[in-house]
Amino acid sequence: MSRILTLILVLVVPVAAQAQSPAALLGRCLADNTSGKDRKTLARWVFLAMAAHPEIKQHVAASAARATEETNEAVAAVFTRLVTESCVEQTKSAAKEGGGQALQGAFQTLGALAMQELMSDADVKATMGGFEKYLDRNKFNHILGGP
């Protein structure tokens, strides 16, 4: 992956560095208790939610509404399993320590993991990198110190 694309991904998909707070422990528990299938379901949910934005929805097929409902149901099952079965103690601790903000941070960590699952696909990487051919490399090299 090029330095430019890596720089852009770091800016677009920030992951907050957290110490061993209850929220961080919950985030780790969530990550440890999700499968690749779970993470793909979460990523599909995020994609479909973003596709509902007025600027984006014109580019998405009409079947997205049906897929969104099916995905909402699948994500609800994943969240329910994680919070009420797999990570009960970590969820209680994070909620007690940091409330909704701690829970949100833990699930953001899980969301970032879900996006990494998709970003590892060669077709996704190629599509994400497609804009690079239009960049003014001289300007970037001047800033980044490249050749």
Image: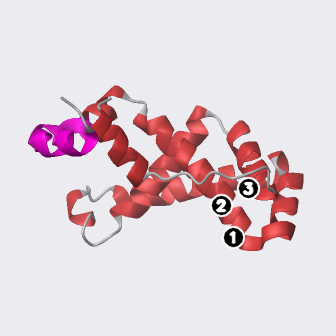
Distance CA(mark 1)–CA(mark 3): 18 Å
Which secondary structure is most common in the magenta stretch? Answer: helix
Task: Evaluate whether residue 66 shows in this view.
Answer: no
Q: Which percent across, then down, holds residue 112?
A: 53, 48
Q: Which residue is mark 1?
A: 101
- Residue assigned mark 2: 105
Q: Which mark is residue 138?
A: none
On screen, residue 82 above or below 117: below
Please state the horizontal and vertical placement of residue 96, each as a whole percent of the image: 86, 69
Q: Which residues are magenta?
A: 127-144
137 is within the stretch colored magenta? yes
Q: Are marks 2 and 1 in contact (CB under 8 Å)?
A: yes
Q: Magenta segment: does it hold 114?
A: no
- The residue closer to the viewer here, 61 or 124, is 124
**Mark 3 element type:** helix
Q: Earlier in the sequence, mark 1 or mark 3?
A: 3
Q: Secondary structure at mark 1?
A: helix
Q: Which residue is mark 3?
A: 80
